[in-house]
Image (spheres, helix red, strand yellow):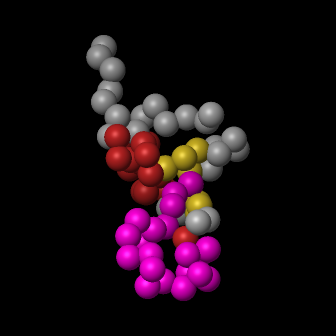
Amino acid sequence: MPKIKTHKSTAKRFRVTGKGKLMRTKIGKSHLRRKKTQRILRSLEDMHEVKGSANKKRVAKLAPYLKNK
């Protein structure tokens, strides 16, 4: 049976914690940062847990080898 290809952008956007939670970053970090206040920029640094079983299934299908590090 051949290996499953990983969707590379999905693998870069999500992380799995030691307890197995799927974490994501918030949008709006990449460009036009000078217009945003420092409070907003600090809030964008945090990673947030992915909610919803449908979203978790989709990420698991796109990045099957995303595991705990």
Q: Quadrant of the N terminus?
A: top left
In the rendered image, residue 12 lying in the magenta stretch gets the answer no
Outermost residue to the top? 1
Image coordinates for residue 16, horizontal then vertical, percent: 58, 44
What residue do we see at 32% from left, 27% from top? 4
Looking at the image, residue 26 lies above or below residue 12: below
Q: Which residues are magenta?
A: 23-43
Asked whether the viewer can see residue 57, the reply is no
What residue do we see at 49% from left, 50% from top? 14
**Viewer-proximal residue, 15 or 34?**
34
Looking at the image, residue 37 lies above or below residue 57: below
Image coordinates for residue 40, horizontal then vertical, percent: 56, 81
Looking at the image, residue 62 lies above or below residue 13: above
In the rendered image, residue 41 lying in the magenta stretch gets the answer yes
**Viewer-proximal residue, 36 or 46?**
36
Question: What is the quadrant of residue 61 in the picture?
Answer: top left
Q: Quadrant of the C terminus?
A: top right
Outermost residue to the front? 34
From the viewer's perspective, is 20 left or right of 7? right
Asked whether the viewer can see residue 18, the reply is yes
From the viewer's perspective, is 40 left or right of 18? left
What residue do we see at 35% from left, 34% from top? 6
Image coordinates for residue 42, horizontal then vertical, percent: 61, 74
Question: What is the quadrant of residue 30 in the picture?
Answer: bottom left
What residue do we see at 56% from left, 54% from top? 23
Question: What is the quadrant of residue 60 in the picture?
Answer: top left
Total numbered circles: 0
